[in-house]
Amino acid sequence: MCGRRFRPGLEKEIRLITGTSVGVGRTATEIGSELLVALIGNPNAGKTTLFNALTGLRAKTANFPGTTIERRVGHTRLAAHRIRLLDLPGLYSLSGTNPEEKLVRDALLGRLAGQRQPDLVVLLIDATNLERNLYLASQVLELGLPVVVALNMIDLAEQAAIDVDVERLGSELGCPVVPVVARTGRGIPELRGLLESVVHRPWTPTPLEGVPSPEECEGCPFKARFDWAEQVGLRCSAGRSPAHGRRTDRIDRVLTHPWVGVTAFLGIMFAVFALIFWVAEFPMDWIDRGFATAGVALGTWMPDGYLKSLLVEGVIGGVGGVLVFLPQICILFFFLSLLEDTGYLARAAFVMDRLMRRVGLPGKAFVPMISAHACAIPAIMSTRVIEDRRDRLVTMLVLPLFSCSARIPVYAILTALLFPHRPVLAAVVFTGAYSLGIAAALGMAFVFKGTILPGESRPLVIELPSYKLPSLKTALLTMWDRARIFVRRAGSIILAVSIVLWALASFPGTDPPAEAHSMLERAARLSSAGDEVAAAELTRSAESLVSQHALANSFAGRIGHSIEPVLRPLGFDWQIGVGILSSFAAREVIVSTLAVVYGVGESGADPDSRSLLQTLQQAERSDGTRVFNTATAASLLIFYVLAMQCLSTQAITRRETGGWRWPLFQLGYMTVLAYLCALITFQLLQAAGVT
């Protein structure tokens, strides 16, 4: 049994963990005017909520230099000092080998490129799980950096009748400890005050008691740390409400049940999607009307010509057609943040793990799977936490099948075409699209398990955090962060693609067809005879014919016509084909592409200029039938659920696998899968007479 007193320094064990010797803190004079403060803690300890409480909106998301791991950096002030707060990835130990643990070690030791050693560390500890958090605390404290402990979720500890002796905990750890509730802001002023006081005093690390050095405890340095954490936890806290544990157990018996839990998960996601359609309907309509009004105003003010066409059709029509879905994206991430903050998503991971392992996916894949519903790129990057190469590869191959946020505008427009003004049925289709993506990913993983990537996956080891009330502020900040990312995409890649597509759809110019000349001559005669209504209608028909003729003979039209024979069995015309090709840049680009190729906003000063949805609802083929009937809309929806359509994801897969073999395979199997399923959908609905 290891229980001898710790000798000051513990240099040898720290070298084993970090590869360096113990450092010492710096004074405020040595630090300068800006402080670098690192925020570190276990997963589910409330680190993101505390980060938001300290920085608010003064934060940005990016990758660590030279890595693919996401970081958040925020700014705040402490008296005379400007604080740069670095939110480090959540982890349980500094001695592990996965990329996150190595990165945190390097960040605390000042080894990251372009990143100096932190001046101060805020160590977040969950008051309801003191012993588990103290293992990491022992390693952080031994680095010799100035440390302030934020004892978070003290309210939940009080509810569970856990009495934490804050003063004794500070004495045991040798650093200041302040109880906080990051979700409500309780204790945050006191925490800021402690940070200020630590900055203005020289820091001398206090040796920890009871943790032996490796030579004093042969073969059990990790066990010794756990023993120390347990002993300190017992000395500094007491009690736990049996009722609290029973209540959690009762809830978990439902939410983690093999069948009831899956049903509950689907029900919760259906409710979220129903709310998305119901709540987002009004702001979407305002945004749509706003862009339509802007197009009309600009079209009235500007003279006819290419510049007017570019701004009205390319910029306003293309970008506006995508930004209209911003409310749905905001609402989705708002509710996902609430679900994560309550502790529910960890239960969903636990429930899904049973199914995942049966189909050949590792338990650790659930975290990348959740990330993939935002974007497949960071999800594929995060597969680095999966140690086994086979598990990591199969996870990367199926992650793009999960419905990312870029698909939301596509789903939204197609569900609106299928069920206009019927939010409940639209929510059913939306839930079905997400479920189909999940089912396809699991199904393909099962296929790979029995063919090209045989083997068994490792089970998931996951912590089920305490249930707690979610932080409204955190949810709003998460929503704001994702909205900024979406708007930046609309202002960069989508704008660029919209302009390119406008050019492809506008050039080379062609002479109007003879039929259009005849229609305009008849319109002039009708106007002379006083029949202005008929003349105006005939003029609009002639202008529409001119536009269709010009588009069909443009560069975009020629490309679309060349691939139309391949797409026709799916119910797609050449204009949809142009949208499919353009959306390889980004899936949501198909919405702006359809806005361009179907001429949304082209009527310029027409006060009755139609929205994209109205245009697509009324679009007709050459034989007079509707383009976006039920069969075509359903076929296109299925295609976009399953197709790759993202060159950025392909590039990341190539980088993570070290070659083009697997990215090309990924593109190939997803394209074939999407084509076949869309083909079956369209042909079956047509055979059943569904139009």
Image (cartoon, rainbow, N blue to C red):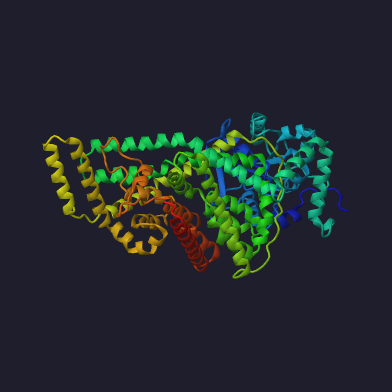
Residue at image location 33% in from the left, 42% down from the top: 316
Image side of residue 410 versus residue 509, left or right = right
Q: In this view, does 643 lie above or below 485?
A: below
106 or 160: nearer the viewer: 160
* Residue 146 percent coordinates (x, y): 68, 41
Residue 16 seen by the camera:
yes
- Position of 651 with respect to 43 (left or right) is left
The one nearer the camera, 342 or 426, is: 426
Observer-nearest of 664 and 277: 277
Residue at (71, 33) in percent of width and height: 178
Vertical order, 606 against 691 (above or below): above
What's the residue at 41%, 55% (across, down)? 583
**Closer-to-camera residue (661/434):** 434
Q: Residue 122, percent across and down?
A: 66, 40
Task: Report the number of discs.
Answer: 0
Image side of residue 375 versus residue 41, left or right: left
Q: In x, y percent, where is residue 446?
A: 62, 63
